Image: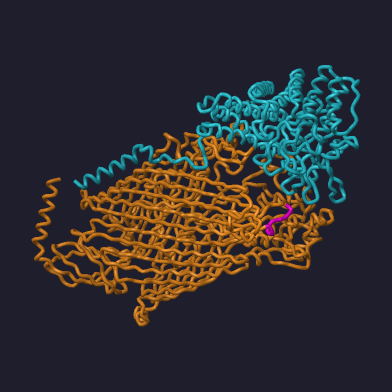
Chain colours: A orange, B cyan
Amino acid sequence: MKMKTCIAALLLLCAYGRLQAQQVLKGKVINAITSEPVAGASVSLESTKQGTVTNADGAFTLTVPIPDTLVVSHINFITQRIAVNPLHLQPLLVEVEEAGHQQDEVVIIGYGTTSKRFNTGSVSTVTGKIISQQPVTNVLAAIQGRAPGVFVSTQNGLPGGNITVQVRGKNSIDAGNNPLYVIDGVPFISVPLNNGKADIEFASGPISPLNSINPADIESITILKDADATAIYGSRGANGVVLITTKKGEAGATKTTVNFYDGISKATDRSQLLTLPQYLMIRREAFANDSTPPDVYNAPDLVVWDTAKSTNWQQYILGGTDHVQNINAGISGGNDMTSFLIGGNYRHETSILPGEQYYSRGGAHINISHHDKNNRTGLSFTASYTGDKNVQPPPMDGYTMLPPDFPMYNPDGKLNWDLFTLNPSATLMQPAESKTTTLTSNLVVYYAITKALKLTVSGGYTSTELKQYAIQPLASLNPLFGEPNGAISGNTAYEAVIAEPQLNYEKQIGAGKLTVLAGGSWQNSNSTATVIHAINYSNEALLYSLGAAGGIDYINDSYTNYKYVSGFGRVNYNLLQRYILNIDFRRDGSSRFGPGRQYGNFGAAGAAWLFSETQWAKSRLPWLNYGKLRASYGITGNDGIQDYQYMSSYRPGVSYAGVTTIYPVRIANPDYEWETNKKTEIALETGVLHNRVRINAGWYSNRSSNQLVQYPLASQAGFNSYEYNLPAIIENKGWEFELSSDNIKSRLNWTTNVNLTVAGNKLVSFPGIEKTSYASRYVVGQSLDVIKGFRFLGIDPANGVAKYEDVNKDGVISAPADYVVTGNQSLAFYGGIDNSFTYQGFELSIFLQFVKQEGLRPSFAPGFDYASNDNAIVLNRWQNPGDITNVPRAATVYGTEAWNANLDLSTSSAIVTDASYCRFKTVSFSYQLTPSTSKKIGMKQARVFVQAENLFTISGKERTDPELLTTGGGIPPLHSYVAGIEITF
Amino acid sequence: MKHLNTITVLLILLGCATGSCKKMIEAKPPVNEITSEAAFKDSAGTVAALLNIYSQFGATGGSIEGYYSPYPSLYADELEPTSAGSNDYEYYTNSVSINNATNAACWSRLYYVIYECNALLKGITGSPALTGSFISKTGGEAKFLRAFSYFLLVNYYGDVPLVLSTDVTVTASLARNTQAVIYKQILQDLTDATGELGVDYPSAEKVRANKWAAEALLAKVNLYTGNWKDAEAASDLVLNSGIYTPLEEPANVFLANSKETILQFEEKYGYSWSGIYFQPFYGSVEFSITPGLLQAYESNDLRRKEWIDSVIDNGIVLYYPAKYRNSNFNMVNSAEYTMCLRVAEQYLIRAEARCHEDKTADAVADVNIVRNRAAIDPVSAGISKDSCLNLIEEERKRELFTEWGNRFFDLKRTGKADMVLGTAKANWKSSDSLLPVPQIELNNNPSLIQNQGY
């Protein structure tokens, strides 16, 4: 220690002695292709880390005391290193090449960064630029189709609707398949806060938590896929990790940017339904076929309702226009030591649904970074706060199938209750409101203990709260059921604190560089929920006040505390910039497991070989600019189960004899453990033709086992199931391909990016499956997404009755005995194709997304009942003996042979159909004014743009939008058109 | 030095993470749950756990009466469905499939109750904070409820697993025990309960079992097992308690806390499952009373007048049980509670026991008390033993229809199921006297074997 101090003092003295000889270096950094100045580039000396930042003209001034290496770096450019000598200093022109598509782009990984070149794992990145081309409400919609191995699907297209992300398939039967979301180092929730709380029904369904993140605040989204990339997240890396990095301040002159767009969204294609005359004809035919006269009970649509008055329910329910306005504004700037960014955003959308629905969101984003002069200590603080308000009725999409003559009101002006509880007018009288507030914040402090050793401590706090309120006035309730009027208030919240100390050590050892990371993580999160149903309001004007209620029907609350503590490490050795070995390790402790089962070890090894750097390749394969072979293997875990499954406990139940009773909640199992996922990957990365064409191909195989399931029990044990590890194995295997090509590179630039994933999912083994209720859903040896049902054998030409295979030959068609596998909803392949063109200030980007899959279409039982219209396909129904068709006879009398057979259509192979599609997902066109023109109007930059999302879709006509795999109803992603302007001054 | 300190702190943190800093991953228990130990730490928690068991039977907090009243009536000769719905229809046609959802619930809901009873009995045993008399009284109630549950199970399924523990590693794989073993446990539990329970109700209303409830069920169980003397003795005790007699007007029998009531399950909303199932909805009913049951009444029988009503659907007159008149969509009475045990049944139990003991005159006297309340003529005392037994069977049919499977169980225990149901029902087979063990139970516990005929 003493010795070291001495040497340091000596060095300092020497440096001081040299001060007299120092020289000032002046220079300018320009873009090698456009020759435009590069502002905000960091220019520093390698030995002392002393440095500065280029100004708006790309110029810099720096004192150079000793011969040294000048390092010029900028996030968008390849880092340049130039030798400088204080004795021979001349003005320096540094040309930097854009880092775009190059192998030296910075790649964000778990607890650090690397470059594409030296990365040993499988990582996909979607840049903020790609996100900014799409006028989406939820940022997850913007990564759809953009990354191989990442499947994004919209569960509900209305604002706030949930969007799920699946990285490399379904790995788990019961413990969840959502990836881990990490925003600026802080884990975020992946499941909607109101999931499973059906108290407040909302047209957009469960609300996606990621909806609270303003897409424009995002710098990049990185998806970690293989063991090498995810093992550092240990027990939560099994389903992949989505790292969301928000924008940071950029050094340079203060810059103000305002982006505004305005546009509309509409529902996508509608189903072809029967017109009123067709509907009436088929309903009457059904009664004639069944030799039963229609009456007020079995056919209000024929004998009560006005058969001359038709409503197009699809148009009424989904025909509206969602008008969207979105504004983002931000100021950023700073110098080489301190930079800042402050941004604000506001979005307002109306709804395609009838009535006065809307969605609005506003928020602020802030980042401040600072480091001392020699960059030895520094900190960075980032925080975002978003509030949104969503006003919607309960789900209405089911009403699109109402019979065309269904009247919302009876002739006497009262609501029509012939369909019991169904009436769009009544639903619209029950508006629900949901407000979300989300705060994400993160502080990183670092201190370089020595040149080689750096201590970083990051801490974060996230809180998100969802408040919902719905009212049910008496007029909206069918009086037959005598339900009281009421209001439901739901309040769910999640908050998490995280602290992560890390040590980084970097040292040249022999011919290679050793990088070591050691860190710890401690997390504590709480989830709470309270739902109150207040009833019997004497004054409905006070429905929004719980206090005005005549009584409380129920109060449900819940609380969970989740704690998590880990130690992790990474050792990376890069030999000759050619051979790289990377080893990750993590030991996790999670409160989700019982005493003695809380800890688990996870880890991975990855290796890469840059074979293009070998002499052999350089001489024999001169066209190969970049070639890397990499492989990884490791184990990650999944603890995505409910909390407290190890605890034997009681919960409050109904009141009895004046006492609030308590009931046993579960059979506790103190012994279950992590679900594990063993991931293997081998990949090849290449760059040819002066690196203008880059092709990557990878093969992966993930086997997850020790499945955490609710293991079925004979109910004599008191409960039907309990948490249990099952030795079932699920395998996800596939190929991922990426091609990116700079087709034309001159004044006109044309780049193409293609990604393709060919995936397969298989339940490899499930001991004793036949004895569990899982047998009705899964088949060993097949995908987890198999569809089971009756095998449809067509229509008997003699009588028009649908026929099914009697698998067990017992003479009757019964479920599940006669079920067979009728289809597979696993994705066969999927991907995206992006073509981007730039010419002077113009930029055009066209993105196509495609999916090959099977899905279900709506059933087609002609004239089935008076509650639902039919698809136009029923016009091909069987009518007379001898008719050859695939649509059965019309039937409406409950329990008849034909009716029963028609009922079974909805669980048969007859509704399994190809649900593949190709979507023109995004078209974005923009024009940026030339710098001189911009300057003339007093701006640094000005850009106008038009963008279209989900422009049109090519798919089979048998179903509505194929993104929703449900049989009917549902609201698919909307198609949107916006125009906007972005100015910087 | 400063660096060293930092490193030390960090190493400690890391050590913590990799070692076992217990506190750091000890989750706080949820605020809306208490651990099983905490639940039985005091009398309030224990009572709360006990009362939940009662709530499982009625419509406010559970479902069991909803399964055990309408369905055995469909299965026997009391009810017929008005349309061919699959689940109900399987009961009516005596072809309950091994996957029938109602049947699966009949089995599993009772075993949940049994689990609750076992957990309570385990929890209070040796709990230091509870007094001996409290333990004995709550234990008595839990044993009563466990006995009632096993009584229903054994009459529905025959042999069933006898579960007296909450240890899943033991209970989940138990095989079926013989009916004799089950009945032995039921008698043991009830005998214990009659000793442990007091004559006063533990609650303000008659919604928790007292000593007489245990005696009443004991009488019924002894009747079912042919212990005539014990049956007579137990019902004697109930009838002589003076609390429940003279008999209530038929119209008031099912109202909350009626004089008739020995034990009811409290209904917070004032209606029961039977009300929900049987009351007309949209001008029709789901189940109608069979002509056979309808014809069993004399025209002036008050029970026919008060407990059976009709609705005209599409010109067809449908008769339906109207013992309970309130439902979730139609409240016409003051509050009705779900009846568990009532005193008229005790007269009929004593009558039957006495008849078997050749005390025919006393038996007829008991029957006449029930007939008198229904405003029909008394039967003369001088009838034969066989006629007396027949009379009691008919009276039970008229009195106890659509209540807790009484009719179906009576036909079975008197050996008349094949004769009566074989005539009344098209598909009746001898093996139908037991319902199938739900297939899902067999799937999840290979030690269970299915009843014959399924």
Residue A663 x, y percent position in the rendering: 58, 37
- The quadrant where residue A594 appears: top left
Residue A724 x, y percent position in the rendering: 51, 37
In the image, the segment drawn in magenta is A474-480
- The quadrant where residue B271 appears: top right
Quadrant location, the C terminus of chain A: bottom left
- The quadrant where residue A184 appears: bottom left
Residue A107 x, y percent position in the rendering: 35, 57
Q: Is residue A383 left or right of residue A862?
A: left
The relative height of residue A856 versus residue B221 in the rendered view (above or below) is: below
| Residue B144 magenta | no
| Residue A477 magenta | yes
Residue visible at 36% across and 73% down?
A: A746
Q: Is residue B261 left or right of residue A715?
A: right
The relative height of residue B301 versus residue B318 in the rendered view (above or below) is: above
Q: Nearer the viewer, residue B93 or A229?
A: B93
Residue A710 x, y percent position in the rendering: 54, 39
Residue A114 appears in view: yes
The relative height of residue B203 versus residue B222 in the rendered view (above or below) is: below
Quadrant location, the N terminus of chain A: top left
